Image: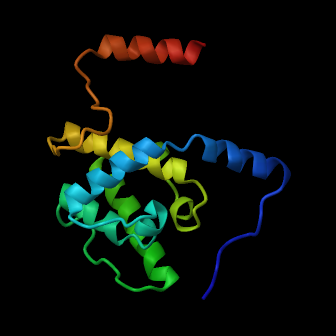
C-alpha cells in the first residue's frame, strides 16, 4: 500500500498545520455529519475524516443534490480509485456552482492534511444546496442571498479597503 505522507512537520510548516487544526470546529463537524447522513442515508462512522476519505459518501451526497453528477462511484479500497472519487466530487460541486476558492484539494481530505478546509467546503455546499431549494431538518450553511446588491457591494468595498 502506498502512502503519500511526507512525514512529520517541523518549524514553520508545523506551526501552520497547528494553526489550521486549531480552527477546526467540532460542532460544525457534528452538524455536517448529521446533514450528510440525512441527505445520503449513509453513516460517516465515528471518524469523520476516515468516513469521507474514500469519496463514496461525498459522491452520493452530490448525486442526491444534483442527480447524475458522478456517473461511476468506485467502491475499491485502493488509493487511486478513492482519490478519483474525491476528484469526481470536486468536479461535480464546481459544476453545481461552488467557487474554486471554496473547495478543498483531494489531499486535504485523503491525507488528513487540512480538514478545516474540507469542513469549510462542505458548509458552503450545504448553504448552496439550501439556496437551490434543497432543504433538510439540519440547518447548516449560510444561505446566500443576492436581494440587495448595494449592500453586498458595500460589504465587499469595506472588506477590500481595510
The residue positioned farthest toward the bottom in the image shown: 1
Q: What colour scheme does the image use?
A: rainbow
> Which residue: 34% across, 63% down?
58
> Which residue: 44% across, 61% down?
48
> Which residue: 23% across, 43% down?
138
31 to the left or right of 139: right
Report if residue 77 is visible in the image. Answer: yes
> Which residue: 32% across, 60% down?
92
Quarter-of-image position of residue 9? bottom right
* Numbered circles on residues, count: 0
Report if residue 103 is visible in the image. Answer: no
Residue 126 horizontal/vertical position (percent): 29, 45
Residue 32 horizontal/vertical position (percent): 35, 49
Quarter-of-image position of residue 43? bottom left
The residue positioned farthest toward the front in the image shown: 46
The residue positioned farthest toward the right in the image shown: 11
Q: Nearer the viewer, residue 58 or 147?
A: 58
69 to the left or right of 106: left
Quarter-of-image position of residue 37? bottom left
Q: Nearer the viewer, residue 60 or 34?
A: 34
* 113, above or below 79, in the image: above
Question: Which of the image's four quarters has the C terminus?
Answer: top right
* 71, above or below 37, in the image: below
146 to the left or right of 79: left
4 to the left or right of 102: right
Residue 97 horizontal/vertical position (percent): 31, 46
Residue 42 horizontal/vertical position (percent): 26, 67
Amino acid at each position: 500500500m502506498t502512502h503519500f505522507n511526507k512525514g512529520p512537520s517541523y518549524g514553520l510548516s508545523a506551526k501552520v498545520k497547528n494553526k489550521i487544526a486549531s480552527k477546526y470546529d467540532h460542532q460544525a463537524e457534528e452538524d455536517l455529519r448529521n446533514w450528510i447522513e440525512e441527505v445520503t442515508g449513509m453513516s460517516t462512522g465515528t471518524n469523520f475524516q476516515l468516513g469521507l476519505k474514500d469519496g463514496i459518501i461525498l459522491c452520493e451526497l452530490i448525486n442526491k443534490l444534483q442527480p447524475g453528477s458522478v456517473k461511476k462511484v468506485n467502491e475499491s479500497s485502493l488509493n487511486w480509485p478513492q482519490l478519483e472519487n474525491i476528484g469526481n466530487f470536486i468536479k461535480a460541486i464546481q459544476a453545481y456552482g461552488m467557487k474554486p476558492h471554496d473547495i478543498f484539494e483531494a489531499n486535504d481530505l485523503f491525507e488528513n492534511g487540512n480538514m478545516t478546509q474540507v469542513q469549510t467546503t462542505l458548509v458552503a455546499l450545504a448553504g448552496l444546496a439550501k439556496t437551490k431549494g434543497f432543504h433538510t431538518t439540519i440547518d447548516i450553511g449560510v444561505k446566500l442571498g443576492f436581494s440587495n446588491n448595494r449592500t453586498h457591494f458595500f460589504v465587499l468595498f469595506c472588506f477590500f479597503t481595510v
